[in-house]
Amino acid sequence: MPSGKTHLRIELLLLPVWVALFYLFVDTSWQAGALFAGAYLFSSLLLSPDLDLRYNRSRRRWGLLGFIWIPYTKVFKHRGVSHSLLFGTLTRLGYLGLLALIIAFVLSYFNIWAIPSDALSAPPIDLKFLGILIAGLWLPNVIHTVTDHVHSALLRH
């Protein structure tokens, strides 16, 4: 397998290509491009499929919060569902969402932070915004997984 550094280099080298393609074919506004690039960088640096490994650079980038990924490493074996093209990113986002909900409810239970009564009602969703965000978060993980598969295929031959 390519190292974490190699994965990150490939993802970051491809970012200008993706931003240019995004600008040409999706949206020419700087806000949309910034959202896409920001989500892409966040995903490349902090939501690597290799978070299913006990020791990895992505987890270290979380700093003091790196410990939150320990249960994730226990649930997901390396190169399993967390490396799935379809479900990989969803496992990490779902995991973070679950942690956020648990923290919010614990803080609310101890009256440290009150959850507003309208917080659980669904606000209107801008589908274009959501699509751009999902593309930015998903694409680096696809590149990571495809790179793993290409590397494995080349080693077999």
Image (spheres, rainbow, N blue to C red):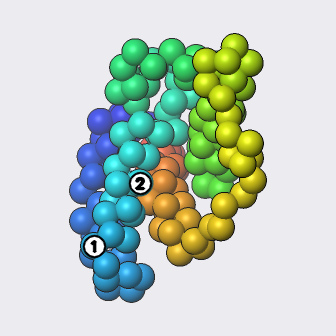
Quarter of the image for residue 95 reads top right
Task: Looking at the image, tell me whether mark 2 or mark 1 is earlier in sequence order.
Answer: 1
Residue depicted at x 60% and y 43%? 93
Kindly identify which residue carries mark 1.
30
Q: Is residue 131 above or below residue 25?
A: above
Q: Tell me which amino acid carries mark 1.
A: Trp
Q: Secondary structure at mark 2?
A: helix
Give the foreground label among 2 and 1: 1
- Residue 59 visible to an observer of this rendering: yes
Pinpoint residue 100: horizontal percent, then vertical percent.
62, 32
Mark 1 Cα-neighbour bin, 10 Å: few <14, some 14–19, many ≥20: few
Is 50 or 108 nearer to us in this picture?
108
Residue depicted at x 31% and y 82%? 28
Residues under labels 2 and 1: Cα distance? 14 Å
Is 102 or 124 nearer to us in this picture?
124
Residue 75 relative to residue 22: left or right: right
Q: Quadrant of the N terminus?
A: top left
Residue depicted at x 41% and y 54%? 39
Is 45 or 114 nearer to us in this picture?
114
Mark sitting on residue 39? 2
Q: Tell me which amino acid carries mark 2.
A: Ala
Q: Secondary structure at mark 1?
A: helix
Pinpoint residue 21: horizontal percent, then vertical percent.
33, 78
